[in-house]
Image (cartoon, rainbow, N blue to C red):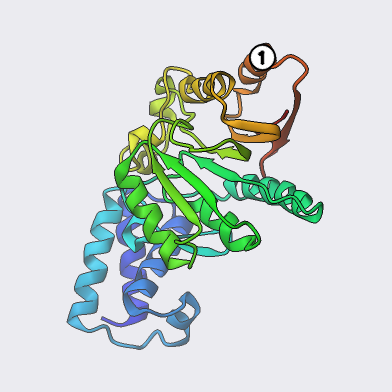
């Protein structure tokens, strides 16, 4: 089978499994490029190239998994985020492009403080694959150390691999425990992309998300507010935040009102800002103390 024939065969297989033609074509290009260790453009530059038996078997196995709905990122074992190639598997949520906006907000504030010759202590709560904390550490080498917390030891194993992969293993301190509880000192900037999908919304999710990504990284109570609300209360009850600290939260698009109301009850006079994602939805809540 040639490269050209494999692309057409794979596209038909995925379409028969229910994928739209454009998505099916893109997925088989990515998977075949992965098998052959070439860029997608190279597939069309040499469509006559013959696949070896081993290459064909690897492609067929990946396409079979994709037919069952397994996300492409898990099939490849990695996902790009903030210009970084991150390792991902079924122990962690796949990083989303909109979360890059959250990283940009934290970076902007960190750099503002660094220009004032202040060195902020940064913590990432619910780090998962380590996407946020690794992006921050790589992008801003002036931060001497950062904390990353997660309640899943399995997720922290992936985060550790990503820290090592990008040369920040000595600066990122991985901590196992509930939300911000493991932090050994108060922090200046706290960022959290916690589970915020409601269990009532489970059937609205795409099957490749609902059936393959870890449920504990997706769902947080009926309305998806359980962990975010618990984090806010924890920050209020414990000495987690330094004076003039800021908290950066990724939230569900219908959660601003409930979370803002709770935050203002806990901290009267709090300065609060909401940022929108690429689709114009209110998805990032910023608390300034």
Residue 123 drawn at (x, y percent): 55, 43
From what the image shows, is residue 64 above or below residue 121? below
Is residue 72 visible in the rendered image? The answer is no
Q: Residues within 10 Å of mark 1 (few under 14, many from 20)?
A: few
Q: Residue 273: name its quadrant.
A: top right
From what the image shows, is residue 190 above or below residue 73? above
Query: As drawn, is 211 to the left or to the right of 274?
Result: left
Foreground residue among 163 and 251: 163
Foreground residue among 152 and 35: 152
- Residue ranking furthest to the top: 265
Query: As drawn, is 52 to the left or to the right of 141?
Result: left
From what the image shows, is residue 123 above or below residue 50? above
Q: Residue 284: name its quadrant.
A: top right
Identified at 33% across, 39% down, the residue is: 152
Identified at 61% across, 20% down, the residue is: 259
Q: What residue did someone put label 1 on? A: 261
Identified at 35% across, 33% down, the residue is: 216
Residue 117 drawn at (x, y percent): 78, 54
Is residue 161 visible in the rendered image? The answer is yes
So how many labels did they put on this image? 1
């Amino acid at each position: 089978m040639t490269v050209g024939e494999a692309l057409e065969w794979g596209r038909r297989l995925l379409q028969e499994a229910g994928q739209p033609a454009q998505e099916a074509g893109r997925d088989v290009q990515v998977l075949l490029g992965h098998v052959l260790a070439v860029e997608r453009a190279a597939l069309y530059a040499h469509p006559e190239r013959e696949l070896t038996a081993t290459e064909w078997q690897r492609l067929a196995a990946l396409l079979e998994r994709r037919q069952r709905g397994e996300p492409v990122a898990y099939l490849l074992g990695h996902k790009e985020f903030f210009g970084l190639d991150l390792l991902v598997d079924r122990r962690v949520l796949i990083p989303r492009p909109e979360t890059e906006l959250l990283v940009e907000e934290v970076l902007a504030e960190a750099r503002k403080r660094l220009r004032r010759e202040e060195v902020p202590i940064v913590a990432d709560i619910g780090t998962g694959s380590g996407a946020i904390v690794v992006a921050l550490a790589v992008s801003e080498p002036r931060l001497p150390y950062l904390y990353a917390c997660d309640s899943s030891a399995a997720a922290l194993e992936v985060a550790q691999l990503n820290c090592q992969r990008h040369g920040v293993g000595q600066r990122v301190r991985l901590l196992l425990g509930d939300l911000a509880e493991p932090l050994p000192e108060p922090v200046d900037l706290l960022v959290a992309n916690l589970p915020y999908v409601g269990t009532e919304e489970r059937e609205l999710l795409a099957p490749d998300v609902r059936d393959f990504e870890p449920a504990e990284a997706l769902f947080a109570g009926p309305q998806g507010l359980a962990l975010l609300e618990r984090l806010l209360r924890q920050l209020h009850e414990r000495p987690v935040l330094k004076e003039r600290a800021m908290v950066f939260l990724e939230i569900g698009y219908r959660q601003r009102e409930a979370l803002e109301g709770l935050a203002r009850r806990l901290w009267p006079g709090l300065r609060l800002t909401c940022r929108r994602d690429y689709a114009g939805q209110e998805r990032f809540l910023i608390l300034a103390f």
